[in-house]
Amino acid sequence: MIVATVPEYYQYKKEHSDHDQDQLVWFKEQYEKGILLCCGLFVPHDGTGLWVIKADNVDEALKIVNSSPRVRDGMLADSARVVEWNVHLGSDLFS
């Protein structure tokens, strides 16, 4: 998933200190389940990043993404999107 936060995100997280902690817990839970393979911010950091999610199809990936605190709290921008990705080299790293 290509992730982008809304412009209000930084103000929101100042006012809701538990939001980032909730998101971190969600990341760890998904990672431990083998669903979230990796995630991180783009550099230079501008509120965008990447979540690599293991799912059978786009609908399943959307269901997973929609369970995240970022979505629950309305902090993902409309430009955030789930894209399918076929790994040609290195798929063993994600098995």
Image: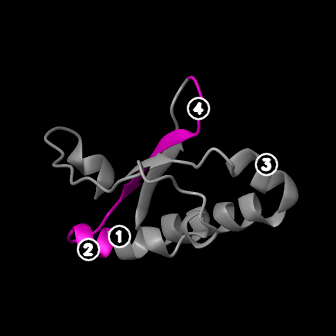
Q: Which residue is mark 4?
A: 46
Give the spatial CA distance, label 4 vs label 2: 27 Å
Q: Find numbered disc 3 in the image and state the secondary structure of the residue it sits on.
A: helix
Disc on the earlier residue, 4 or 3 = 3
Q: Are marks 4 and 1 in contact (CB under 8 Å)?
A: no
Residue at image x 59%, y 65%? 74
Tag 2 or tag 3, which sits nearer the N-term? 3
Q: Nearer the viewer, residue 44 or 53?
A: 44
Helix, strand or loop at mark 1: helix
Numbered circle sitting on residue 59 = 2
Q: How is the image coloured?
A: one colour
The answer for how far apart the CA atoms under marks 1 and 3 are is 26 Å
* Numbered label attached to residue 62: 1
Near mark 3 (Cα within 10 A), the count class, few <14, some 14-19 or many ≥20, is few
Q: Are marks 1 and 2 in contact (CB under 8 Å)?
A: yes
Q: Neighbour class for label 2 at 10 Å: few (<14), some, many (≥20)?
A: few
Disc 4 element: loop
Question: Could you tell me the amino acid type at mark 1?
Answer: Leu
Residue 87, image x, y percentages: 18, 45
Labels 4 and 2: the sequence-earlier one = 4
Report which residue position mark 3 lands on. 11
Span highlighted in magenta in the image: 44-61
Residue at left 74%, top 45%? 10
